[in-house]
Amino acid sequence: MSGSDYTATEMMTVAAARALGNEDVCFVGIGLPSAACNLARLTHAPRLTLVYESGTLETKPHVLPLSIGDGELCETALTTVSVPELFQYWLQGGRISVGFLGGAQVDRFGNLNSTVIGDYQKPKVRLPGSGGATEIATSCGRIYIVMRHNARALVERLDFMTSLGHGPTGHERRAHGITTEGPALLVTDLCMMKPDPVTMEFVVVSVHPGVTHERIRENTGWAVRFAANVDVTPPPDRVALDTLRDLNARTARAHGATAVD
Amino acid sequence: MSEFLELRDAVARLVRAGDRVALEGFTHLIPFAAGHEIIRQQIRDLTLIRMTPDLLFDQMIGAGCARKLIFSWGGNPGVGSLHRLRDAVENGWPQPLEIEEHSHAAMANAYAAGAAGMPCAFFRGYRGSDLARVNPNIRFVPCPFTGEQLASVPAIRPDVAVVHAQQADRAGNVLIHGIVGVQKEAVLAAARSLVTVEEVVDQLPRGANAAILPSWVITAIAVAPNGARPSYAHGYYQRDNAFYVAWDAISRDRDRFSTWMTDNVMRSR
C-alpha cells in the first residue's frame, strides 16, 4: 500500500482485533484469527478470554503458535482440558461467545469451505477439512470471519459447504434449530462486511483507507453490495501497529522461520 | 497388566496388517517413533485413525501403510498441505486412499463413545454441513425426549491405539500431562494398546487428579526417548517447528520424500 506505513494484512488484522472486547470468550483458529485475537488481548482487550481447540482455556501466548497445540498455549493457559471435554462442555455447552474462522472460500451468506476445491470425490485441491470449524460455526454465540480478499476466496458458489453460515439462501439456520447468531462480520484486507439484517447477505460497511469500491467489486466473486453509508476504516494506530509487529517478530524468532506474516 | 517390550517387538505383536489403528496426540505427544516402526515393518492395509493426520500420517500414507484414513483435519499446522495425503487422495499415489472425513467434535465424541462402550455418539453437530452428504457414517436422530435432531456417528473402536506419554512407573502405570488430547479415550476405546514413554521412573508424581492410565488398561509399554519428535513432550523437549516448515519441501516431491524416508526412517533404528 503506497502512501501508508502499514500493509494490507496489518490493516486486516487490526480491524479484526477491534471487533473483540474484554467480555468475549473467543474460540481461536490458527493463522489470521490467532494474530487478531492476540493483538486484541495485547492492546484494548486485556481480559479477552482465548480458547484453542487443543483444550487450552484462557491462554495468553507470548508468541503466536504455529499449531493449535503448541506448548506455549498450554504453558500460558489457566487450565488445559481434554479435547472431548472442550468440544462437549465448553463449545457445545454454549460457553464461547465468539468463533473466529477463516477458510478457502466464503459466500455472500458467510457459509465456509475448508474441505475441497472441485468435486469432493475427485478434488482439484484437497484442503485440510473441518477441524473444529463445523461445530464452531453453529455453537459459538456469533462468528467473525477473516480472509484475504480475492475472487477465488469470496465466491458466488462454494465448492463444498464445510461450515454453515446463514445457509444457501441466507435463512437456513432457524430451520436447523440453531439459535446462535452466525456470521456477524467479515474482515478482509480490503474492507469490512456485515450481514444485511433482512437478506443476511454480507454488504460492505467500511472500506480500508485507499481502497476503491471498484477494486472490491473486481475482487469479489458475487455482485457485492455496499451499505447506504460506507465508512472508511480508521487506519491502524501506532500502538496497535507496534504491538502487532513486536508479536510477529517474537513469533518468527521463536519458530526459527517466517511462516507467520 | 501392561507388559514392557522393545518397541520393535511391541509393534510386531500388536499391529497387524488390515488393522484399524489409532495413533493419537493432539499436536503434542504424537507417537512418531511407533509410527516409524510400523513403517519399517511394512505393515499394510491399515485403516489409520487420527483427528489431525499431521506429518506422521503423511509419512505412513506416503510409505504405503494405509488403505483408509479416518480424520477431521489433514494439514501441516500453520504451514499448509500434507502433500503425501493430497497425492494419495488426488492421484492415488502410492495407492488409492479411502477417506472417512469428520469434524473434530464428531471424532472427539466418537472416541469418548468408544471409551464408554457405546455403539455410537450423539451430539449437536454437522447442522447444515455438506460433510453429512459425503460421509454415510454421519446420521441424524431425534432426541427421544425433546425431538431435537442430533448428529450421530459410530463409536471409534480401534483394534490398536498407539500413544506416547511422558512417564511410566515400573508397575506400568502411565502419566500424560500437558495437552492431553484424546489419548485416554483412544486407549480405553481400543482392543489393544501400545504406549511409548520418554522414561520409566520409580514413582510417578503424586497428585489426586494426574492424568494416569492404569497398567491394567494398557497392553504394552515401550521406552522410546524422544519418541514424539518432531512433535513435543511437555517437560522434555519442544516442538521442532522448523522441521514442520521444512517438511513442506521434503514431502512435495515423491522422489525427495522417498529418499528422505529411506535415510531417516527405514535405515534408522
Image (cartoon, rainbow, N blue to C red):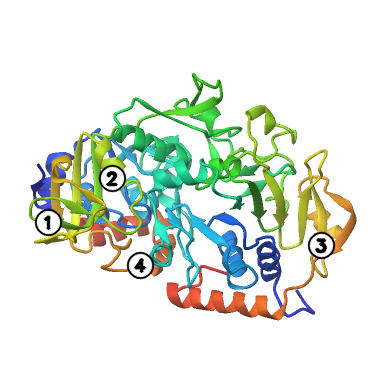
Nearer the camera: disc 3 or disc 2 = 2
* Disc 1/disc 2 C-alpha distance (Å): 17 Å
Q: What residue type is labelled 1?
A: Asp
Q: Which amino acid does label 3 sit on?
A: Val
Question: In the rendered view, would you say B26 is above or below A235?
Answer: above
**A254 or B89: nearer the viewer:** A254
Q: Is residue B212 left or right of residue B30?
A: left
Per the image, label 2 sits on a secondary structure element best described as: helix
- Are both tags, 1 and 4, on one chain? yes
Nearer the camera: disc 3 or disc 1 = 1
Residue shown at 75% from the left, 33% from the top: A169
Residue annotated with mark 2: B184
- Using the rendered image of the protein, determine whether residue B233 is visible from the camera's viewpoint: yes
Quarter of the image where one finds residue B161: top left
Residue annotated with mark 1: B169
| Host chain of mark 2 | B
Quick one: label 3, few (<14), some, or many (20+) residues within 10 Å?
many
Quick one: label 2, few (<14), some, or many (20+) residues within 10 Å?
many
Query: Which disc number belongs to residue A207?
Result: 3
Count the labels in the image: 4
Nearer the camera: disc 4 or disc 2 = 2
- Are both tags, 3 and 2, on one chain? no
* Disc 3/disc 2 C-alpha distance (Å): 49 Å
| Host chain of mark 3 | A
**A158 or A201: nearer the viewer:** A201
Residue annotated with mark 4: B240
Q: What residue type is labelled 2?
A: Lys
